[in-house]
Image (cartoon, helix red, strand yellow):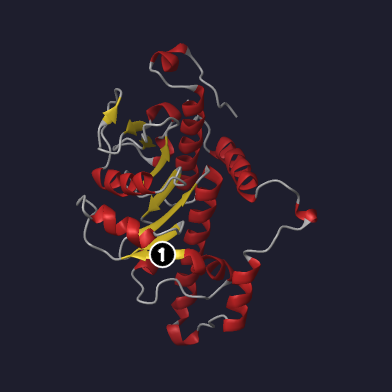
């Protein structure tokens, strides 16, 4: 997997090797999201903080689909919404509002994904939110936050309320809107959005039989899962980070099924 600059034109643009690696990871994140069906034509967005003290972040150019994103096509912006450097495209303004809010408030938000998948939107609009219907949901619910719908995310003053609702959580349902996850690494953010999307999909399928016919997990089991999620790793599980393993596997999938993202 290439994670270094491929030719002098990037060096001439002032892109460091550290930033190029982030660009490659972010482009792969876009390609993987398309493979999993989380994209929404040219809408929704994933961002990554660019290395350096400026709090610049990278996001998709408004006009390209997720399966077209490459490392070099990503747009760099600052927290005030100014595009850094030259680019043939602008960015989705609602994406700027959401992502600038979180990047500006959370030092651990190096990667942020926000989607409008059918199942994610469906659960975001469910009055009870994500229900404790399955093991995946049980693991997410203790750290899941909610943000009430205020309209299309075009008003800058919504950022303060979004950040307040997010608190210190890393997965969120934006009511009547969609899903969101963040992480300090691409693997953490990808793992968060993957599990949230899959939990929403499972809930939609479960509720197809009617709310009265689904089995809510017992309270004791819910508490046990909360405890288990904070347990120490066993030696047999190995010493490597779960998120690193997830991301390395995801990169291999992206390289096999959607090559060219590292261009």
Front-lying residue, 212 or 103: 103
Residue 3 at what x, y percent from top left?
Answer: 55, 27
- Relative to 229, 193 lies left or right: left
Q: Is residue 18 above or below residue 55?
A: above
- Quadrant assignment, res 56: top left
- Relative to 49, 6 lies left or right: right
Residue 144 at what x, y percent from top left?
Answer: 45, 65
Residue shown at the point (51%, 55%) measured from the top left: 192
Q: Is residue 248 above or below residue 211?
A: above
Residue at mark 1: 145
- Relative to 28, 116 lies left or right: left
Residue 84 at what x, y percent from top left?
Answer: 30, 27
Badge 1 crowding class, 10 Å Cα cut-off, few under 14, some 14 to 19, many 20 or more, is some
Q: Secondary structure at mark 1?
A: strand
Residue shown at the point (43%, 52%) measured from the top left: 38
Front-lying residue, 221 or 249: 221
- Quadrant assignment, res 58: top left
Q: Is residue 22 above or below residue 13?
A: below
Residue shown at the point (39%, 77%) measured from the top left: 128
Number of numbered discs visible in the structure rendering: 1
Front-lying residue, 133 or 180: 180
- Relative to 220, 159 lies left or right: left
Would you say residue 218 is visible in this rendering?
Answer: no
Residue shown at the point (30%, 23%) measured from the top left: 85
Which residue ends up furthest to the right in the rendered image? 236
Which residue ends up furthest to the bottom in the rendered image? 212
Residue 188 at what x, y percent from top left?
Answer: 54, 49
């Amino acid at each position: 997997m290439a994670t270094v600059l491929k030719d002098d034109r990037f060096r001439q643009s002032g892109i460091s090797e550290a930033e190029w690696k982030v660009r490659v990871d972010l482009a792969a994140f876009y390609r993987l999201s398309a493979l999993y069906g989380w994209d929404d034509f040219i809408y929704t967005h994933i961002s990554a903080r660019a290395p350096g003290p400026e709090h610049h972040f990278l996001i998709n150019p408004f006009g390209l689909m997720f399966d077209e994103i490459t490392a070099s096509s990503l747009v760099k912006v600052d927290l005030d919404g100014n595009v850094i450097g030259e680019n043939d495209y602008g960015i989705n303004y609602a994406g700027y509002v959401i992502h600038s809010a979180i990047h500006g408030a959370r030092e651990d938000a190096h990667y942020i994904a926000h989607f409008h998948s059918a199942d994610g939107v469906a659960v975001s609009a469910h009055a009870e939110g994500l229900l404790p219907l399955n093991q995946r949901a049980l693991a997410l619910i203790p750290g899941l936050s909610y943000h009430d719908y205020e309209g299309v995310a075009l008003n800058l003053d919504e950022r303060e309320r979004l950040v307040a609702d997010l608190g210190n959580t890393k997965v969120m349902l934006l009511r009547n809107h969609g899903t969101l996850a963040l992480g300090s690494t691409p693997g953490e953010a990808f793992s968060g959005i993957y599990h949230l999307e899959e939990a929403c999909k499972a809930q939609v399928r479960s509720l197809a039989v009617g709310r009265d016919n689904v089995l809510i997990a017992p309270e004791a089991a819910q508490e046990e899962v909360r405890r288990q999620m904070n347990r120490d790793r066993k030696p047999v599980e190995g010493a490597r980070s779960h998120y690193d393993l997830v991301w390395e596997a995801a990169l291999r999938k992206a390289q096999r099924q959607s090559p060219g993202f590292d261009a």
